[in-house]
Image (cartoon, helix red, strand yellow):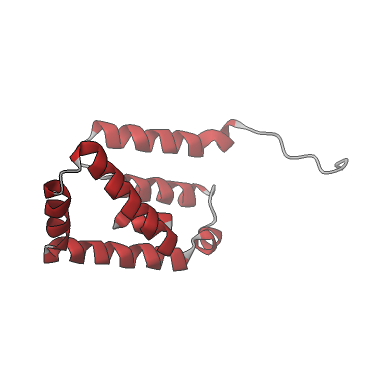
Amino acid sequence: STIGNVPKPIVYYDYVPVAIFAAMIVWVAADPEISMVQAAMAAAALNVFGGWVDAKLAVSYVPWDLMLLIGSMLGVSRAITNSGVADFIADGVKNAGFGAHGALFFVYAVTNIMTELTTNNAAAGL
């Protein structure tokens, strides 16, 4: 029998996800052939198959509306880059004579305005 709401004792098995995460970071740093996405997917699969993460619960924790917004903003940023608008704006900032600090402030100000209109992650993608 148990008394009160006593948590179960921590065993070494509970620290395996931390080791998987550390191994993922080392793997990405050591092997230039592997991307962070591939390593993260491998680590996620190990956590699911090891029983530390319930796949159905993990899917319910993902904010899908935010993922769609970020994905669409990445598409918009790709369109801005491919259409030449980004080069046009960069040339305008460069030729305006702002200098390095002024150009940095301009990028900060535009990102700040975009953050007010969208989310932080979507503005960073732009």
Q: Dividing the picture into quarters, in which one does residue 43 lie?
A: top left
Q: Position of residue 117 (x, y in %)?
A: 41, 64
User: Is 43 placed above or below 59 here?
Assistant: above
Q: Position of residue 58 (x, y in %)?
A: 52, 58
Q: Quadrant of the C terminus?
A: bottom left
* Near-viewer residue (111 or 46): 111
* Near-viewer residue (32 or 92): 92
Is residue 38 visible in the rendered image? The answer is no
Q: Residue furthest front?
A: 97
User: Is 94 placed above or below 20 here?
Assistant: below
User: Is 90 placed above or below 28 here?
Assistant: below
Is residue 24 visible in the rendered image? The answer is yes
User: Is 109 placed above or below 3 here?
Assistant: below
* Near-viewer residue (97 or 43): 97
Q: Position of residue 83 (x, y in %)?
A: 13, 66
What residue is shown at x 35% (from left), y 35% (from top)?
Answer: 25
Q: Quadrant of the N terminus?
A: top right
Left or right of 33, for residue 18: right
What residue is shown at x 25% (from left), y 31% (from top)?
Answer: 30
* Near-viewer residue (115 or 22): 115
Q: Position of residue 18 (x, y in %)?
A: 49, 35
How many dots with numbers? Answer: 0
What residue is shown at x 41% (from left), y 57% (from top)?
Answer: 115
What residue is shown at x 11% (from left), y 52% (from top)?
Answer: 91
Left or right of 59, for residue 89: left
Left or right of 119, for residue 83: left
